[in-house]
Amino acid sequence: MMNPVSTMNSSTKSDEVESTLEHGELVLSKLAPNDEIERGVQGHYFSPLGDLDRWEQTSDDSIVEIDLLSSNLFRIRITPAGARVPGPTYAVIFEPSVGPDEFSYQESNTELQLTTKDVRVVIGKSPCRIEAFRTDGSAIMTTPKSNGLGSYSRLNDEFIVSRVREASSSILGLGQKTGGLDRSGRSLILWNTDVLNPRTLKEFAVGFKRDDPRADQRSREFDPYYISIPFYQSLDEEGRAAGFFIDNLHRADYDFSHPGETRIRFAGGAYAEYVFAGPDLVSILNSYTGLTGRMSPPPLWSLGYHHCRWHPYSDQDVVKHAETYRKREIPCDSIWLDIDHMRGYRVFTWNPKLFPEPAQTLSKLRDLGFRAVTIVDPGVKVEPGYPVYDSGLGRKAFCVTEEGAVYQGQVWPGRTAFPDFASATTREWWGDLNAKHIQMGLSGIWNDMNEPATGDIPDSAMRFDGGKYSHGAYHNAYATLMAMGTYEGLRKALPNQRPFILSRAGSAGIQRYAANWLGDNMSRWEHLAMSIPMSLGLGLSGQSFVGADIGGFGENCEPELLVRWFQTACLSPFCRNHNDAGGVDQYPWSFGSEIEALCKAALSLRYRLLPYLYTAFVEASETGKPIMGPMVTEDQADPTLRLIDDQYMLGPNLLVAPIVEKGSTARQVRLPKGEWFDWWTGAPATGRLVSAEASLATIPVYVRAGAVIPMWPDVPPSTMDYHPTSIDLQVFVPSKDGIYTSRLVEDDGTSFCYEQGEQLSTTFTLTRQGDSIKLEAKTEGTPYVGFRRTECRIHLRSAASGPVEILRVDPEGLVWQFKVSHR
């Protein structure tokens, strides 16, 4: 792709339009806008592009660019004349480009067209507009004819993008949002927010009545939230999907409440939008994560169960909790320490009274099979003599005000300075601090308060990159840039150990560096229910490694709620129990032996399923497909699946339908097309809408016919040093003829040796033809150091009849025994 030009030459006359067409790139320069515009709710005083008077090939600078990046992906960029080039967004890490022989160009009196085998991009001349269609004629984006704003309009630093939205279309994505999975009919704000800060209510609840749920930060409808990702998918009535990603970090308002129209308003920055023609949702996610990156395979221990509590634990308390898990035989992989482990909330320190010998404590935990994670907030206490503050000052590593003074906020340690993560040197400094911290014996870093949260002091005076950029330019990216610096520091400190970082906030690309949890939720049934569509929305935004705090962070949990939350979290990507210092205990054993047994059963299922779950993570790292996927991705043409957001797919073959209502012991489950079986009984599910019984001991789970579900043969106390000699394969034999594939990925789960090929990938192909049933296991790769498995125990479930022929193709020198049993 040719390097695009981004500004208009100062010698260009105000009534000229110029363009360049070369190597898949159409560049259009726009002149004076129309004087008259229709004034709408969000469009007061904004000026549209106006007419395209003429174009010609030129080497001058330009303001409108169309880049064809693949046959079904293109980018639009519009830059006002003389505009300053904005700083990097750090979202897009790879851009393909089509060659000059892969598209065609046509011009008429009214429009210009660029056409690939999948997409036709139309640039209207009068008025200038940008529209796109698939080559089958279906619309991707068209311009409203009567709103007066056109495709794009601008006022000072702000701009509005407008497009037609069909009344029956669904809107998905946009990162972390409350409410249902479908965003249609709503107006949403993209601005990373410390949700429970009192200032948040004053800023974002203005105009709402007191009893309006949108004015309650703890409600299911409050907006904005912690993670802002300006990427969404539109799904039309026929099930065709298109994707839209605006690569911009400024505050944005996405308004889907106008009848028949979508309006998107950004408070600043450049307009650079990537348009994905689809029409397949999963392929759009693959393309989007190809641009913004995908997670690496995480450390296996991070998929285990995590114990956390905001509480002033002492070293003795921590070790006692660890010993309690082992005594009660409840699996757990890590113990997390909140802010009280620090000396006066100073980051990268230890409280000398609570943890006089932290390295020794961490060593004891590791001997018990536990890893440890500590919280690291961005706020650095303003205190001369505190080494972190002093070194930050010396390196000019902190954000400054417009006048050049170090910006000060107010968080846990009092007056705080904030690292300027827009600076590469600051990220390196921060990474070195994390590296030194983790080498004491930690295994992960937990980033909180990174929206950034500044307490009682507004953050607007905080500037970035040495004061070069306003607060709005990097506010939404703050957490991602913090995670970037942390990740690079951990890689430097422990080059062959997979880093694990958990972040509260994030932006496009956060998935490359960190997992996200859903923030400060409450011990409420509605918050358990809300966690499902919120997690699904993040998965559709490129971030799969997500989960909500088990039991709720704030308020007091009750026994039934705790069980149902454990059941849901144990069948989701991230599984952590966490609550605040003022709430009742909500450990698995806190409500008596009966509740403990139910929580333990949920955790035991998760641990046995870790081979299946880890494989799903590896596949997400390869394709970008969500680990926890909405039902619509199973069949986007099925209207009955589109709005379902209280059940989901976990990996490719398990359907999970949690119980999220108090006292409920049954629910309706909508199954996608195909054959499905009850996970617990192996009985075939009859019909598409089934009634699932669910006592307090049961969470409804269904499995796809033909699936091979790999499981550990037992429940280890943790994943540390666990390398079983056998693995169980739950084989759900279909009743209908067909070929069905499943996969198992095995590596050491801790290092990067898989990049050198020390990883086994086994594809299971189950073929049924009449009474003939064959299972083929084809393995590629090399066993990792420590690999011990020599046996696969096959458990035939459901519709098997007669013998099953087992075929296998193994790497040279690798022999496995297969043992078959019927259930």
Image (cartoon, grey):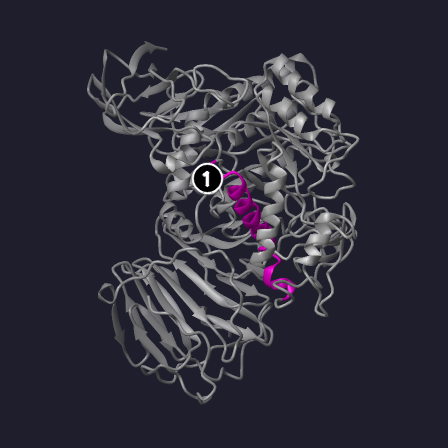
One can see residue 251 in this view: no
Q: Position of residue 6 (x, y in %)?
A: 44, 74
Residue drawn at the location 59% of the way across and 42% of the way down: 435
Q: Position of residue 586 (x, y in %)?
A: 69, 25
Q: Which residues are magenta?
A: 470-496
From the viewer's side, name the closer residue of 457 and 757: 757
Q: Position of residue 296 (x, y in %)?
A: 44, 41
With 152 as the anchor, is 581 left or right in this view?
right
**Is residue 132 a member of the stretch shown in magenta?**
no
Find disc 1 in the rendering and name its residue. Answer: 630
With 790 as the anchor, is 151 left or right in this view?
right
Disc 1 secondary structure class: loop
From the viewer's side, name the closer residue of 373 and 68: 373
Q: Residues within 10 Å of mark 1 (few under 14, many from 20)?
A: many
Task: Tell me the kind of residue under disc 1.
Answer: Pro
Q: Is 593 drawn above or below residue 505 in the view shown?
A: above
From the viewer's side, name the closer residue of 629 and 287: 287
